[in-house]
Amino acid sequence: MNNPSPHSLIDCHVHLAALPEEKNGCFISDKMLKSPLFRFLLWKHRLSVRDPANANRKYLQDLLEELRASRFVSQAVLLGMDGVYSSNGRLDVNATEFLISNDYVLTQANTYPDEFLPGVSINPQRGDAIEELHRCAEAGAALVKVLPNTQQFDPAHDRYKTFYRTLASLKLPLLSHVGYEFSLIGKDQSVGDPSRLRIALEEGATVIAAHACSYGLMIYEKFFPTLVDFVNRYSNFYADISALTLPNRMRMLRKLRHHPEVCDRLLFGTDYPLSVFHLPAWGLVNLRTLWNLIQTTNRFDRQFLICRHIGIGVGSFRNLIKPTSSQPLQFDP
């Protein structure tokens, strides 16, 4: 699965960003608006918080333009972001910094079905988590994304077994953040340990560990043994290569070069809108190739070419998509 043909890849890790506007169901705190991630995002895309409708439209158009220009990637899974939920299963607005609603994700994917697949986000702590799984599955969701560090839940808790079994029955992969969380505000970094995803795997869910289980602190990759163990132990375990060109995660990318048995389970991802650096290729490719990588400004293509040139094969999320009917997406917002 690690030799995709040109323009056949699906990027399984692309963030849908949006400012709150009428009826889109999104939310962002004042604290988050001042964070490095959103300052970068606003600067990179020249977005104005004073005009959310135009800002949201421009973000999507920038993404579409870059995706359509890619030589290797034809589609992207748009990721939502659920909020924090209290022990009674209700949304805790005060603890939630950032929320991209599932309806907004589904709407954009439905508007651009040739380019986007909906990657909804459902915190298993929410009281209606099972109902939301079924609703989103019926609406055509391609996967469910969670970020335990920020959404403040422990994926290893027994109370979520039914959630994982439902994912398995619906054939919806679970894409979970792994490692430290820097872009959004992380509360409990320990829940980024991939070993906490074991219970989901044992309940039959297909699990995609984001960032190839990279620890994210540059010094060493403490989760690499877990990555190897899960690849050998679970046929329903995968990992994506999103964000692995970032300086704090590139150690894992270089490490993967020497483990082809792990590469067979890798899926393509970028972590868009984050940058894709050419630094991991330094010293591993000739100067002409390096120059070509530097000149490649399309983030989707640069991510793919870096992996190819340093000897890392990646597969496409396309292989995990459940069969669907030819009917257009339908959902009730």
Image (cartoon, helix red, strand yellow):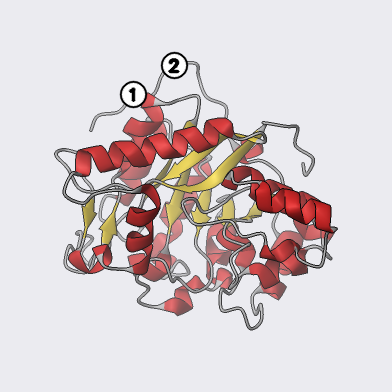
Q: Is residue 113 left or right of residue 56?
A: right
The foreground one among 48 and 232 is 48
Q: Is residue 150 above or below residue 320?
A: below
Q: Which residue is mark 1?
A: 330
Q: Is residue 95 left or right of residue 165?
A: left
Name of the residue lying farthest toward the top: 326
Q: Which three-letter amino acid code belongs to the residue tagged 2?
A: Gln
The image quadrant of residue 247 is: bottom right
Rendered location of residue 183, percent (x, y): 41, 66
Residue at image x 33%, y 38%?
58
Residue 157 seen in render: yes
Rendered location of residue 33, percent (x, y): 25, 62
Q: Which residue is mark 2?
A: 327
The foreground one among 216 and 93 is 216
The image quadrant of residue 155 is: bottom left
Rendered location of residue 3, percent (x, y): 79, 40
Q: Crowding at label 2, few (<14), some or many (≥20) Cα neighbours within 10 Å?
A: few
Q: Quadrant of the C terminus?
A: top left
Residue 312 seen in render: no
Rendered location of residue 66, percent (x, y): 52, 37
Q: Which three-letter amino acid code belongs to the residue tagged 1?
A: Gln
The answer to whether marks 1 and 2 mark residues whose Cβ atoms lie closer than 8 Å is: yes
Local secondary structure at mark 2: loop
